[in-house]
Image: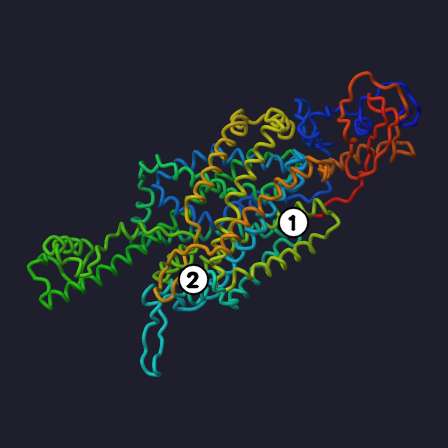
Amino acid sequence: MPKNSKVTLGLPHSDPVTESVADLLTLAEPLDYKSSRMSMGLSPGAQPAMGKGLLPSPGDEEGRPAWNSKLQYILAQVGFSVGLGNVWRFPYLCQKNGGGAYLVPYFILLILIGIPLFFLELAVGQRIRRGSIGVWNYVYPQLGGIGVSSLMVCGFVGLYYNVIIGWSIFYFFQSFQYPLPWAECPIRVVNGSQAIIEPECEKSSATTYFWYRQTLNITSTIEDSGGLNWRMTLSLFAAWLIVCLAVIKGIQSSGKVMYFSSLFPYVVLICFLVRGLMLKGSVDGIAHMFTPKLEKMLEPQVWREAATQVFFALGLGFGGVIAFSSYNKRDNNCHFDAALVSIINFITSILATLVVFAVLGFKANIMNEKCVVENGEKILGYLNTGVLSHDLIPPHVNFSHLSAVDYQEMYGVIKTVREDSFSQLGLDPCVLEDELNKAVQGTGLAFIAFTEAMTHFPASPFWSVMFFFMLINLGLGSMIGTMTGITTPVLDAFPKIRKEFLCVGCCIVAFFCGLLFVQRSGNYFVTMFDDYSAGLPLTVVVMLENISVAWIYGTKRFMQDLEDMLGFRPYSFYFYMWKYVSPACLTVLIVATVIEMSVSPAGYNAWVQELASEKFLSYPPWALGVAYSLIIAAMLPLPCVFIARHFNLLSDGSNKLSVSYRKGMTKDLSGLEEENESRFILGKGTPSPSPSPMPSHRPYLGPGGAQEMTNTAGYGTGTPTKTGYQNIHSPESEL
């Protein structure tokens, strides 16, 4: 700006005022305020006009912490997206939904909704450089509740997710002994002299008993809390201590942790794959896994579960993706990042599936051989007692080295000849396929099936230590992203809070809230939170994210913003995905989720000690109320913020521009030579005959502060109007 201009000198002039104070200061072209929601918001119901981009202008990138390297950032995103679900959820879904055929709908939906929505979150976070709350306040203030709902879901998930890390820590330290403590059933001494195997263990298995009785010491119903389990309480404390130390310095500390926590699981998975392929029966497991059942692809349930897995595998809606990307440079190629992280996530799921079924194939062979031996002894006993005739046994069968093939032949003959009384013999078919078809997921896979398989490994303690250390690192990477999704928007909104105090405070509060999950009945609450706290709320959150960008702000303008930021225009493919395909897929997913919740009985699998087995029980009324209150609490900010801002009961926060924008404004002002450069007052002039380009219902609020200045001439309205130039030196987040 010329230093002798009328604005700088504060002289009256008669030129129509068509530009805001910020435009005059930065020598920018006049902004189309009707199309800008990020700078100063819109009146309720106003539709954005096609024009300049909504997103803040680029400024100096200093002032907000940044990743030390691109590798550190990619590892952080990979560590957040690749979690425990890749190891124990994806293999189960493959087995359940057609083996190799399940990969087809999964990959299609990854392309249609996974990568586009992941790219959208990366781009918005990187351009606006704020956490989830600030980002959606900019895009459309009335949907600012999106960020609050994301924060709520992060809180709920973080509470129970860290409990799983605590369980892994407990198993990790229990693995430093030989034999492993879950390798054999414990012996109980009766009457001081008689030794018997623990009945609960004998009815189930050694690993099952160790999990339910010695680890969780679980009660038989959710209504019986049983008090705190002190060993799990200590494990939970250790888990929160590790998380606190990892995130206490923001990305400066968590970024360094990610170098190890993101890479180490791949080392373990590759080691397990190599070792697993050397085990007997591993090929059977892998072949069973990838044998496609093409008819499954026609079932809607398969596509719904594939969409849900794609959705949660990438961490969409949690706020962690946005928070991590907000520390990027503005010109970072987030399109490449979205594709790279999504592909790494998919490959990791495939790798984990190979490992799981190689090990489970080995376990299935062990269990099948055990079944053959036990039932062979039964047949031999029936032969010795005359219940069965020796004529039924093929002459080549050798009971001392009974193979599965020979047993199947005997079983078929006996079943055919003794058809009427066959059931009384109590013989099992001992079919390997049946053992492989036993679907196991979640904690049942990690803490029961996999641990049982590892007891048959040579040097089993070493592999057990490696496995549970891998689970700790997988969980830690996801927890760092979850905690960043909580702390970043809070620090953006309240920059004077020290991040160290906030992180420590959050971890302390979360630990005490997490005591709910380390009661003896705590596993049932983990299941409840896993089923209800995240699924439906997160799907709705991402749906609204998509709508706010693609339909309210406008896909064409967003594409133009991306071109300005990246230096190239993204493929038109993304335009149609954001505009039509992704919203349609998310709508179908929401409807399907609601229908499933309505049709499926609400309950949990309780461990009944007397039966030594699981039994499905319905939630009591109070527990059902808690379950549905989780959904309501997570989604309540959406209508509350919308209503409050629609009726002007809550400021929209859209004037709190990003750090880079404020820095850019400060830098532009530093070149002004007048002594009074911190304040500019427009003189009186002739009212413009044209309508004001700025909404008359609210003043222009510049970046940073809250003070307003009065322009008595108005902006083409003939009435006094306020125009704001706020304090651009407001403190910024230190995260």
Task: Bin the neighbour count of mark 1 within 10 Å (Cα to Cα): few under 14, some 14-19, many 20 and up.
Answer: many
Q: Which mark is residue 487?
A: 1
Query: Can you name the residue that lies furthest to the bottom here?
Result: 192
Within 10 angstroms of label 2, few (less than 14), some, or many (20 or more) residues? some
Q: Residue furthest top?
A: 689
Task: Find residue 129 and name its label.
Answer: none
Expressed as whole percent of the image width and height from the top left, the position of residue 428 reads 22, 57
Residue 58 in sight: yes
Q: Amino acid at mark 1?
A: Thr
Residue in the image at 43% along x and 33% along y = 108
Q: Out of 434 and 666, give the one closest to the viewer.
A: 434
- Nearest the eye: 339 or 12: 12
Residue 718 sits in quarter: top right
Determine the residue positioned at 34% across, 82% down.
191
In this rendering, which labeled residue sits more in front, label 1 or label 2?
1
**Residue annotated with mark 2:** 462
